[in-house]
Amino acid sequence: MPTTGHYRSNKNNHLDLMIETTVGELFVISHDVDDVLLPGAPVWLSFASSGVILVP
């Protein structure tokens, strides 16, 4: 799913991200702290086969 990153907060061992998608804004926790995500950068979003939590 193509998306756009809007907010990035580095917590040393993970990143908190706000991602704008066609279905609305999603909060994402990423453990890939080595890749830099600049605000407004296009990104690709996919879901892991386990560990995904959706909160309404």
Image (cartoon, rainbow, N blue to C red):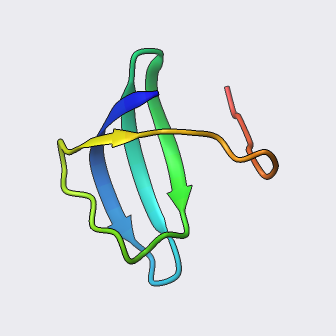
Q: Which residue: 38% across, 29% down? A: 2
If the image is split into quadrants, where does the C terminus sit? top right
Q: Which residue: 41% across, 52% down? A: 17
Q: Position of residue 6 (x, y in %)?
A: 26, 43
Report the front residue among 35 and 28.
35
Q: Which residue: 40% across, 16% down? A: 22
Q: Which residue: 55% across, 69% down? A: 31
Residue furthest to the bottom: 12
Left or right of 8 on screen, residue 21: right
Report the front residue among 44 and 7.
44
Left or right of 4 on screen, residue 30: right
Q: Quadrant of residue 44 in the image?
A: top left
Q: Position of residue 51 (x, y in %)?
A: 78, 52
Query: Considering only vertical position in the picture, is 38 above or below 13?
Result: above
> How many tags in the picture?
0
Residue furthest to the right: 50
Query: Considering only vertical position in the picture, is 35 above or below 49?
Result: below
Query: Considering only vertical position in the picture, is 26 above or below 14?
Result: above
Q: Position of residue 9 (x, y in %)?
A: 35, 65
Q: Position of residue 55 (x, y in %)?
A: 69, 34
Left or right of 30 on screen, residue 51: right
